[in-house]
Image (cartoon, grey):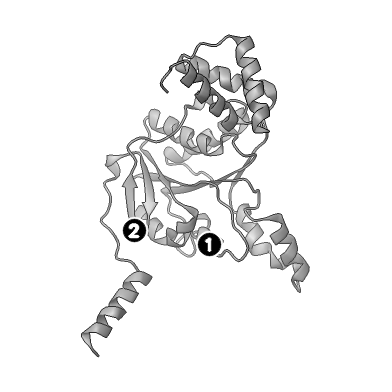
Amino acid sequence: MSKKKLRRIAEALERIAPVPGPVPDFAAADAFVWHVEPDRLEPVAKVNRVGLPLLIGIDRVRDILLENTLQFARGLPANNALLWGARGMGKSSLVKAVHAEAVAQGHGLKIVEVQREDLPSIGRLLNLLRAASARFLLFCDDLSFSHDDQHYKSLKAVLDGGIEGRPDNVVFYATSNRRHLMPRDMIENERSSAISPSEATEEKVSLSDRFGLWLGFHPCSQDEYLAMIRGYCDAYGVAADDATLRAEAIEWQATRGARSGRVAWQYFTDLAGRRGVTL
């Protein structure tokens, strides 16, 4: 066999099973992002997040997720968590905030962000983390699966762990706008065309059942929306009288056609800029 053919075979095998990168220095940061081709964990010097006290209107789910996270950080049993529901209501912000709170309390908890499209590599990531002494919160933001999407099968390695089991030092949090992680029309189409409708979607729908915690996020009221903005103003020292803030915030909400924590932050960002305050 020629050297050229041997090199092509070697390159093909390397693509199938990438050569593992160097073991990262987990003491270098509290947050990392998982990348593939080649596999590597890149440290994040500064995480984009807001403080836990600024997350208003989600008290119940905040307390549940914080307690679950602190249990895990202390080395106690904890559940994987699915945060689902209304857009812009602080799902990903809450995950990052509870991690920051755990770190602030002196726990050496690391957060690792994984992109949905990189889920097929999750087994390699788990093998890397399994050997580490630190504890890790894997985080996948805006998780959902479309028609003929097979990535959900890779996720089972995190939730169930296969024959090896999920590493004791790893917990998985995901956010999604969908409670069952897949479009409703996909569920109905598979049920209607299957010989056994109940079994046709069981594998995919049951994926969400593998999360021990389901935390629902719902649209906020106008009072909660205004309280969010007032909280931002107080935290960042932006002066605004109640009447002006209320009138402008309601007008801002009307132009967006929605009311949420994200819209509240967008209005506040505009207000801070007009007041000359740096965030």
In the rendered image, the vertical position of residue 265 relative to residue 156, given as above or below: above
On the image, the x and y values in percent for residue 194 come to: 74, 71
Residue 252 visible to an observer of this rendering? yes
Q: Amino acid at mark 2?
A: Asp
What is the CA distance from the residue labelled 2 to the residue labelled 1? 18 Å
Residue, disc 2: 39
| In the foreground, 178 or 131 | 178
Residue, disc 1: 151
Label 2 neighbourhood size at 10 Å, few (<14), some (14-19), many (20+)? some
Q: Identify the residue at horizontal 40%, vertical 56% (top origin).
A: 126
Residue 133 visible to an observer of this rendering? no
Label 1 neighbourhood size at 10 Å, few (<14), some (14-19), many (20+)? some
Q: Identify the residue at horizontal 57%, vertical 32% (top origin).
A: 262
Q: Which mark is residue 268?
A: none
Q: Amino acid at mark 1?
A: His
On the image, the x and y values in percent for residue 275 come to: 47, 15
Q: Identify the residue at horizontal 27%, vertical 54% (top origin).
A: 23
| In the foreground, 17 or 102 | 17
Compare marks 2 and 1 and give the one earlier in the sequence.
2
Which quadrant of the figure contains the N terminus? bottom left
- Is there a contact, CB below 8 Å, between mark 2 and mark 1? no
**Label 2 element class:** loop
| In the foreground, 24 or 213 | 24
On the image, the x and y values in percent for residue 16 come to: 38, 71
**Label 1 element class:** helix
On the image, the x and y values in percent for residue 129 come to: 36, 53
Tell me the quarter of the picture where residue 184 sits: bottom right
Tell me the quarter of the picture where residue 13 sits: bottom left
